[in-house]
Amino acid sequence: MGVGSSMRYTIRTIWNADKGCILLSFYKNCTEEVYMSFFFILMLQMIYSYIENGKPFMGLLRFVALFCMGHICIHLASAWHAYYIRKKTPRVYAYIFNKVIDKAVRIELTKYEQPDFYDRFARALDECLTKAMDGLNALTWATGCALSAVAAMFLIARVDPVILVFSLPSIIASFMFSSRINTLQYELRTQETRDKRTAEYVKRVFYEKKYAGEIRLYDIRKVLMREHKESYDSRYELYVTMYRRIHMLRQLQELVIFVLPILLAYIYVSVVLKTTGAAKIGLYVATLGSIDYFAWRVKTAIRNYMEAGRNCMYMNNLQQFLEMDEETVESGKRKVDQPLGDIVFDHVSFRYNGSDHETIRDLSLHIRKGERIALVGENGAGKTTLVKLLMGLYPISGGKLMVDGVDIREYDKRDYQRHFGAVFQDLQIFSLPLSHNVLMKEPENEEERALVVEALEKAQFADVLEKLPDGIDSMVTKEFDDKGFICSGGQAQKIAIARVFAKKPDIVILDEPSSALDPIAEFNMYNNMLEASEGRTVFFISHRLSSARIADRIYFLEHGRIVEQGSHDELMQLDGKYAEMFRLQARNYKDRGEVYAYGS
C-alpha cells in the first residue's frame, strides 16, 4: 500500500469514528496557515512601501489592528480545536481498539502460537492507536502549510515571479529526500518489533506477581536479563545504523531547501537592483524576507506531509491485520434450536500450522447425550486438542465432526459455542469484581447476583465468600484496588468452575481444572460437578486416573489416536496401558498414605 492509500485509509478510519475531528482539523490548520502567510508577507511589503513612498502612518496602523483582531480569532479557534480533539481522541482510540479486538477474537486459536501473528497483533494495537491521530494532525498541518506556501508564492510573484524559479527544483529534491527518510524510519520501527516485544515481555515478567517466586529461587533472572540486553543491543545497533543515514539525508535536505534557493535569490535580487537602480529596494528586501518565509513553509509542509505519510503507513499494519485471513473454523448460519445432543467424530484429523505431524489422527468416536467422558493419556496425546475441535476453536483438517447429526461447520459458530462451558488448566482470573469473574459479564439484576452466589457455593467457594468484606462485589487481585483479594491456585480454579455452574451449558469441558487440588479434593470436586451437571454431557481431562473411575466411559489417547476405551472396570480387566498407569499412580499415593481417591 502506497502513502496515498495509507492516508486515505487513515482519514476514512477517523471519519468513521468521529467526522468532527477531520473537518475541524482541516479547517483550523488551513485557515490559520493561509491567514498567517498573507498577513506576514503583506505586512513586510506594506511597511517598506509606506516608508519608501511616505504614506500616512494611520493606514499602516489600521492594517496592524486588523491583523491583531484576526490573530485573536485564530487563537480562539485554535483553543476550541485543541479542546475538541482532546475530548474526541479517546473515541477514536476506542473505535480502533474495538476493531482490533473484534478481529482478534475471530482469528483461529492456532494463530496465537505463531510469533509472526503476535508481531502483527502488537503493531496493529500498540502503534495504530496513537499514529492515526498523529497522522491526521500532520496531514492537516501539511495541507495548511502547503496552502500558506501557495499564498506566499502568489504574493512574491506580484513583485517578481522569476524569484520563485530558484525554489522549485529544491522543492522537488526535498520531496525525494523526505520520502527516503520516511521509508527508513518505517523500516526501523518494523524491524525493531520483535526485539521490542522481547524487552516488554521481560519487563512484564519482573513486575507480575506470578513470576516472583521462580525469579527469586532460580537463576532464570540471568537468562531474562541476557535476553533483555540482547534485545536492547540489537535495537541499539539498528538505531545507530538507521539514524546515521537519516541524519545525513536531513542535512542534505536542509541544504537543498534553505541554503541554495535563498542564496540564488539574493544573487538574483542584487543583479536586478544593480541593473534597475534602487527604486524598488524596499519592496525587494521585503520579498527576500518573504522568500525565507516561503522556504520555511515549504520545509514545514514537506516535513509534516512525510510525517503524516510515516504515521499513516503504520495504519497499514492495522489494515493488514483487519484484512488478515482469519483461517478460522467455518461458520454456517444454522442456529442451535435445542440442547446439544449426540457427538460423532468421523475419521477426524487435525494438524497445527507448520507442524510435520497430525495431533489428531483419523479419530472416530460416538458420545451420547448425557454421558460422562474421561479423556486420559500422556502429555501431548491430543486430549485438549480434541475438546477444542469439538468447541469449534480449531478447524478440522480432515473428516467430519457432527453434533445431532449436523456437521458443526453448518452451525452459526457463536451461537454453537454458547452451549459450551469450559474450565481449562491455564484458566484466567480477571482484575474485576468476583461477580464479573463468575458470570463473565456484569450482573444485570438480583436474580443474576443470586446465581453468582449459588454457583460459588456449588464450587465449594462459600467459606471464602463469607470472609470477603464486599461479598461478590469484592475486587479480585489488587491491581486496581488495594482492598482486592489475591486468589490461591485452588481458589482461582473454584471461581472458574463456578463459571460453568452459572452458565448451565449443554456440554461441560473440564480440562485439568483441579491441578491445584489434592487427589481427594479433586475426586470430590468431580463428583459435585457431575451431580450438578445431571443430564448434560461432561468431558473431563485429568492426569490423575482416580477421577476417571466415575466416568461412564474412558478414552485413553496416544499420539492423537484412541488406543483403549471403556469403563474403569473394563479397562482394568483389559490390563493395558490404562491399568498400568492407574496402578503406578495408586502405588505412589498409597506409599504416602493417600488412598481414598484410588481405593484402599
Image (cartoon, rainbow, N blue to C red):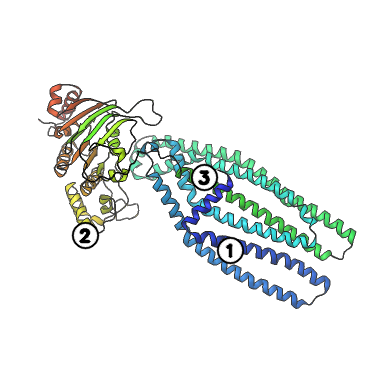
Asked which secondary structure carries label 1, the reply is: helix
Query: How many discs appear?
Result: 3
Q: Using the numbered discs, state the Cα–Cα distance from disc 3 to disc 1 in whole angstroms.
A: 27 Å
Asked which secondary structure carries label 2, the reply is: helix
Q: Amino acid at mark 1?
A: Lys
Would you identify the image quadrant in which residue 189 lies?
top right
Is residue 125 rendered to the left or right of residue 452?
A: right
In the rendered structure, which disc, 2 or 1, sits on the residue that comes first in sequence?
1
Tell me the residue at 70%/48% (across/down): 172
**Residue matched to label 2:** 446
**Residue matched to label 3:** 316
Q: Nearer the viewer, residue 255 or 591?
A: 255
Instruction: Count neighbours of disc 2 (C-alpha within 10 A) and say few if under 14, some if 14 to 19, many if 20 or more.
Output: few
- Farthest residue to the top: give it: 575
Q: Amino acid at mark 2?
A: Glu
**Residue matched to label 1:** 28
Asked which secondary structure carries label 3, the reply is: helix
The quadrant of the image that shows the C terminus is top left
Q: Report x, y in % for residue 259.
A: 75, 51
- Tell me if residue 555 comes above or below residue 87 in the rendering: above
